[in-house]
Image (cartoon, rainbow, N blue to C red):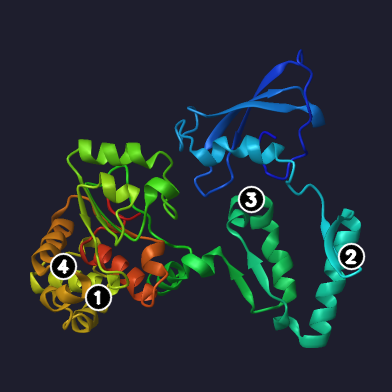
């Protein structure tokens, strides 16, 4: 119960005079993993959650709590929540679900997997891993051991749905699919956000609980927040500037930003110069993507594009950050590549206030 796990034992009705205990745990419903403080009455199966609050002593979430964490009590006590394995059966033409024991469930899974692999081969087994898998230590440390034994290429996950371009680009540029730079949000002075809504997601791949307070701090130190998104999201609403780009044109616009860096002699890779061995190839690749030529396509005028390229290049700690909106489109890999190239060419990678 201290970890607020949705599969915890069902709560009963605690005795009115049972003592109330304070428990510390986390919310595992998104990657922010905010720290929580629970007031729990009673112990064991009859324990009851009295309240859930943010833990102000948590060094990352700093007391932040969102509606998902508050709803943990409802999830925990929901009478329709699955509490044991269920098997679908058909009786007299009617389909229904019946509860079964864990040993029987394990046997059915093993028999089904073995049968499919024997008849149709390993790749006939499909695997889907939902987002909570990466919020669970057991799945992180042991899940891949099991899945690797299935030897199937038909593996899908929340990653393949919304962030594979990040991994492809990280592998190509930094040598490992998980070496994804994240914005130094607490020290940056210019942040360009594309296709992301951190106020709803708590960051996603940069993990910043209470991101609203961090954006307020960015403005308080004289920094700027610019959001590029077709929709006026919650984050766009509090930004210093919101550009409503035409949907699916982010790649062309990002390439025009890179073009501007070369065209206006704004390329300053700094200490990263030895790493960037193909700058001339990049220059040639973006030669035709002038801000003037992409304006009609993206809906962002050339003057604005050039101004933002200058602001990024001249910022004492600036960063470009893009998430799902620029990944789940036809040119998602190009978008994520261009974002990293912008940070690299302006010397903002591994720089205070840049991309870490």
Q: Are marks 4 and 2 in contact (CB under 8 Å)?
A: no
262 relative to 320, above or below: below
What residue lies at 18% left-to-right and 50% top-to-bottom? 316
Label 2 – label 1 distance at C-alpha: 52 Å
| Quadrant housing residue 90 | bottom right
What residue lies at 69% left-to-right and 18% top-to-bottom? 20
Label 3 – label 1 distance at C-alpha: 38 Å
Label 2 – label 3 distance at C-alpha: 24 Å
- Residue where numbered disc 3 is placed: 136
**Which is more foreground, mark 4 or mark 3?**
3
Q: Residue at the top extreme?
A: 17
N-term mark: 1 or 4: 1
Residue 96 lies left or right of residue 307; in this view the side is: right
Disc 4 packing (10 Å; few <14; some 14–19; many ≥20): some
N-term mark: 4 or 3: 3
Q: Position of residue 155 (x, y in %)?
A: 63, 73
> Which is nearer the eye, 152 or 157?
157
Q: Tell me, for residue 107, which label it has, or none.
A: 2
N-term mark: 4 or 2: 2
Q: Position of residue 141 (x, y in %)?
A: 66, 56
Disc 1 packing (10 Å; few <14; some 14–19; many ≥20): many
Residue 181 lies left or right of residue 244; in this view the side is: right
- Residue where numbered disc 4 is placed: 267
Is residue 352 in view?
no
N-term mark: 3 or 1: 3
- Residue where numbered disc 1 is placed: 252
N-term mark: 2 or 1: 2
207 relative to 109, above or below: above
N-term mark: 2 or 3: 2
In this figure, what is the number of numbered marks? 4
**Which is more foreground, mark 4 or mark 2?**
2
**Which is more foreground, mark 3 or mark 1?**
1
């Amino acid at each position: 119960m201290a970890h607020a796990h949705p599969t915890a034992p069902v709560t009963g009705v605690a005795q009115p005079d049972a003592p109330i205990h304070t428990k510390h745990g986390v919310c595992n419903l998104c990657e922010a993993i905010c720290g929580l403080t629970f007031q729990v009455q009673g112990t064991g199966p009859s324990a009851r959650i009295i309240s859930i609050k943010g833990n102000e002593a948590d060094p990352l979430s700093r007391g932040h709590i969102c509606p998902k964490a508050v709803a943990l009590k409802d999830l925990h006590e929901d009478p329709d929540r699955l509490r044991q394995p269920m098997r679908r059966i058909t009786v007299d033409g009617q389909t229904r679900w019946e509860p079964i024991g864990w040993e029987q469930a394990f046997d059915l899974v093993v028999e089904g997997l073995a049968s499919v692999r024997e008849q149709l081969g390993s790749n006939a087994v499909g695997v889907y891993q939902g987002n909570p898998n990466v919020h669970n230590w057991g799945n992180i440390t042991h899940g891949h051991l099991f899945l690797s034994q299935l030897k199937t290429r038909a593996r899908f996950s929340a990653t393949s749905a919304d962030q594979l371009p990040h991994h492809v680009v990280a592998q190509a540029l930094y040598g490992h699919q998980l070496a994804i730079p994240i914005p130094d949000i607490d020290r940056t002075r210019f942040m360009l956000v594309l296709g992301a809504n951190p106020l709803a997601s708590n960051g996603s791949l940069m993990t910043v609980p209470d991101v609203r307070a961090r954006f307020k701090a960015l403005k308080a130190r004289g920094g700027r927040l610019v959001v590029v998104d077709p929709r006026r999201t919650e984050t766009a609403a509090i930004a210093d500037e919101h550009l409503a780009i035409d949907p699916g044109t982010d790649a062309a616009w990002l390439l025009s930003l890179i073009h501007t860096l070369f065209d206006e002699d704004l390329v300053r890779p700094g200490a990263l110069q030895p790493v960037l061995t193909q700058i001339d190839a990049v220059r040639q690749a973006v030669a035709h993507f002038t801000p003037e030529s992409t304006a009609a396509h993206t809906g962002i005028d050339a003057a604005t594009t050039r101004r933002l390229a200058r602001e990024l290049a001249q910022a004492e700690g600036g960063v470009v950050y893009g998430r799902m909106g620029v990944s789940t489109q036809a040119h998602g890999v190009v978008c994520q590549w261009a974002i990293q190239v912008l940070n690299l060419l302006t010397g903002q990678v591994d720089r205070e206030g840049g991309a870490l």
